Image: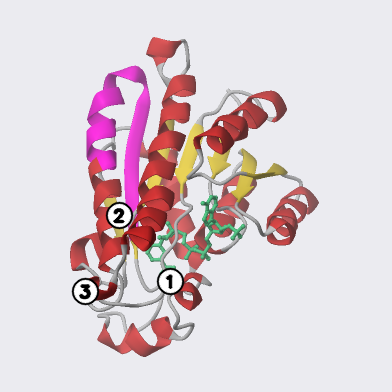
């Protein structure tokens, strides 16, 4: 069976590394992005130049109509979905809980929790043998923040990743008999643009001395774990987490 993947937030960082690796392993890949079309098309061009197959598709995962359209585009252009990487996520400027307003909480929770739930729903509708599908696998990109709490930085973001952990456990049990495995990765301190969104582009280099490994991680190191969890090598693995946080 042909492997067809959606990577949400596949235009940059961990998502882009995952899209590239997946394509090199034979997946046809939909590189979803929010607004950075140039970056998404660069990932697609690189994949196609290496002999792989990919498309770019803009969709805001926090909007239900966009998610519906995204998966319909994949049905039409790539075929039956076999893998979902729920990777898109945001954080905002570092702050304390006593300075957070409801508008910010809504933005974080809508993008980081509602988005992955909606994408998981669409994936299950296509993969579940109860819906006439042939099975598949989902990897949710959580964060070590769900364990550590991100005090003084972004407890809202950490809490959104706590919800992703719970989604992973609950959904994995709900669909285990339907041919779908659901796992998660919990990265931290990975060199991507995300830390600039928090107001500190050099955050990984500031914090790396506090990590047992004394270094930051690279998007490709997270992608390796994601692709393994999606692969048949992980065929008896569901509802689990791989920590990618330099030992923290
Ligand atoms: P990044 O470099 O900031 O890239 C974010 C990606 O998500 C971009 O492709 C962006 O698209 C896309 N995106 C953002 N909001 C979206 C939305 N509403 N709908 C669709 N796409 C959206 O981030 P990253 O560091 O690679 O993070 C990827 C995932 O890893 C996130 O879930 C993050 O929480 C998690 N994570 C990262 C770290 C880390 O240290 N970097 C640690 C733990 C967990 P555009 O290019 O169009 O903006």
Residue 3 visible in the snapshot: no
Mark 1 — residue? 190
Task: Compare marks 1 and 3 and give the one earlier in the sequence.
Answer: 3
Mark 3 — residue? 98
Mark 2 — residue? 160
Q: Secondary structure at mark 1?
A: loop
Look at the image and say whether residue 170 sits in the magenta stretch. Answer: yes
Look at the image and say whether residue 134 sits in the magenta stretch. Answer: no
Identify which residue is drawn at 50% across, 77% down. 196
Magenta stretch secondary structure, dominant: helix
- How far across and how far down the image is residue 217, in percent? 42, 73
As displayed, is residue 104 above or below residue 82? below
Of badges 1 and 3, the one in the foreground is: 3
Q: State the residue in front, 209 or 32.
A: 32
Q: Secondary structure at mark 3?
A: helix
Residue 36, picture quadrant: bottom right
Gap in angstroms between the C-alphas marked 2 and 3:
17 Å
Identify which residue is drawn at 27% across, 81% down. 211
Magenta residues? 167-186
As displayed, is residue 119 above or below residue 207? above
Of badges 2 and 1, the one in the foreground is: 2
Instruction: Answer few, some or many: residues within 10 Å of disc 1's Cα (few below 14, many 20 plus, some between 14 and 19).
Output: many
- In the image, 100: left or right of 116? left
- How far across and how far down the image is residue 64, in percent? 50, 35
Q: Secondary structure at mark 2?
A: helix
């Amino acid at each position: 069976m042909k492997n067809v993947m959606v990577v949400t937030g596949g235009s940059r960082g961990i998502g882009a590394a995952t899209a590239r690796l997946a394509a090199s392993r034979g997946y046809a890949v939909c590189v979803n992005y929010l607004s950075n079309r140039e970056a998404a098309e660069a990932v697609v061009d690189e994949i196609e130049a290496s002999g792989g197959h990919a498309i770019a598709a803009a969709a805001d995962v926090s909007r239900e109509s966009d998610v519906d359209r995204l998966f319909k585009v994949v049905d039409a252009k790539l075929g039956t979905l076999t893998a979902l990487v729920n990777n898109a996520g945001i954080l905002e400027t570092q702050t304390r809980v006593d300075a957070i307003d409801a508008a910010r909480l809504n933005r974080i929770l809508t993008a980081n929790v509602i988005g992955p739930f909606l994408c998981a729903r669409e994936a299950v509708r296509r993969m579940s043998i109860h819906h006439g599908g042939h099975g598949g696998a989902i990897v949710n990109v959580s964060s070590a923040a769900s364990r550590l709490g991100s005090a003084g930085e972004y407890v809202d973001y950490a809490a959104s990743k706590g919800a992703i952990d719970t989604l992973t456990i609950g959904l994995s049990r709900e669909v285990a008999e339907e041919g779908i495995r659901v796992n998660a990765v919990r990265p931290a301190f990975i060199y991507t643009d995300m830390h600039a969104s928090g107001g500190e582009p050099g955050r990984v280099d500031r914090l790396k001395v506090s990590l047992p490994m004394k270094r930051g991680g690279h998007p490709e190191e997270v992608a390796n774990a994601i692709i393994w969890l999606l692969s048949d090598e992980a065929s008896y693995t569901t509802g689990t987490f791989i920590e990618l946080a330099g030992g923290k």
